[in-house]
Image: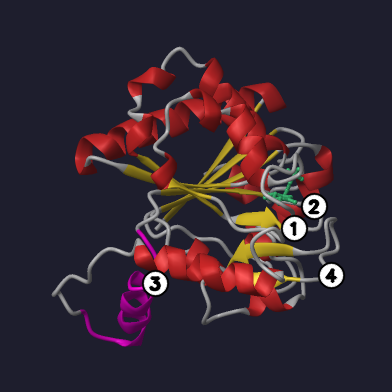
Amino acid sequence: MSIRINVHPSFDVLAAATAARLITKLLDTQNERGEATVVLTGGTVGIATLKAVLDSPAYPAVDWSKVNFWWGDERFLPAGDPETNAKQAQDALLSRIGVDPARVHPMGGPDRFPDPFSAAESYAQELAASAEPADDEAADGAEADAEAQLRTKLPRFDVLLLGIGPDAHIASLFPEMAGIREKAAVAVGVENSPKPPPSRVSLTLPAINSAQEVWMVAAGSDKAGAVGLALAGANPVQVPAAGPAGRSKTLWLIDQDAAAKVPENLMLQ
Ligand SMILES: O=C1O[C@H](COP(=O)(O)O)[C@@H](O)[C@H](O)[C@H]1O
């Protein structure tokens, strides 16, 4: 598994470059597999990236009707609320590109579930229903066992995008809270989130780390501390952004301001 850090000169360049990467990644994956699966993030860079996809003359190269969309987290608000990550993604891109609604999987809100915990349970079921059939190649060892278990619960995520909060949260996994410690479930409900709104739903770290590629996106000097600590190898319970690791690749896509505290030895690699 490789970690790569890409520092871009500004927020706009970061969003445009991440969009270009995403288009190419989806196109390549469709060439290989016929379809592609992306896990979207909310937040500033996440949504700006989707807008930049639509601004790119290359976006029609992707067959958007064969892209599966999932979310890394969601604010527990009614469907269509402008604060939901799903509505923001719809407005920025999804409503404009001819997606197949059956392949779009937003997390549920209070219009469908009594609380974020039942919404998380339902999302876990929806994820499991899209899991790929187990292959017969049984690998040995506890780690292989855990991976095989996870494969029965999750679809193959080709690329998973994650924003980073100034407090180093990723998805809706906040420092020191139960969600970031979760090892068994693939999705969790969150109450008392330090960032409003207080109720949320999130994928867990094991679910995030099942992705082939994880792309960490962040911009701005308020993210520099979180990015620096994460790349210096902090404990994910205190610094959730330190936890994600894609199966084949982890890409850090950040702007110069967010890169200000990245350990120098890593910048030289
Ligand atoms: O609330 C959230 O915040 C994070 C980070 O957002 P940003 O605006 O500080 O970039 C985001 O990754 C997450 O999906 C979202 O629900």
Contact between labelled residues 2 and 1, with CB atoms less than 8 Å apart: yes
Q: Nearer the viewer, mark 4 or mark 2?
A: 4
Find disc 2 in the rendering and name its residue.
225
Q: Amino acid at mark 1?
A: Ala
Residue 168: which disc? Answer: 1
Query: In the rendering, at what x and y percent does residue 162 appear?
Result: 60, 49
Closer to the chain start, of discs 4 and 1, is 1
Label 1: how many Cα within 10 Å (few below 14, some 14–19, many 20+): many
Find disc 3 in the rendering and name its residue.
153
- Which is nearer the eye, 12 or 197? 197
Q: Residue 18 lies in what quarter of the image?
A: top right
Q: Amino acid at mark 2?
A: Gly
Residue at figure coordinates x 66%, y 63% from the top left: 201
Query: In the rendering, at what x and y percent does residue 157 appear?
Result: 40, 54
Is ligand 1 less than 8 Å from the beta carbon at label 3?
no
Element on which disc 2 rests: helix
Closer to the chain start, of discs 4 and 2, is 4
Q: Is residue 24 above or below residue 199?
A: above
Label 3: how many Cα within 10 Å (few below 14, some 14–19, many 20+): many
Residue at figure coordinates x 34%, y 87% from the top left: 142
Contact between labelled residues 3 and 4, with CB atoms less than 8 Å apart: no
Q: Nearer the viewer, mark 4 or mark 1?
A: 4
Residue 112 is at least partly visible in this image? yes
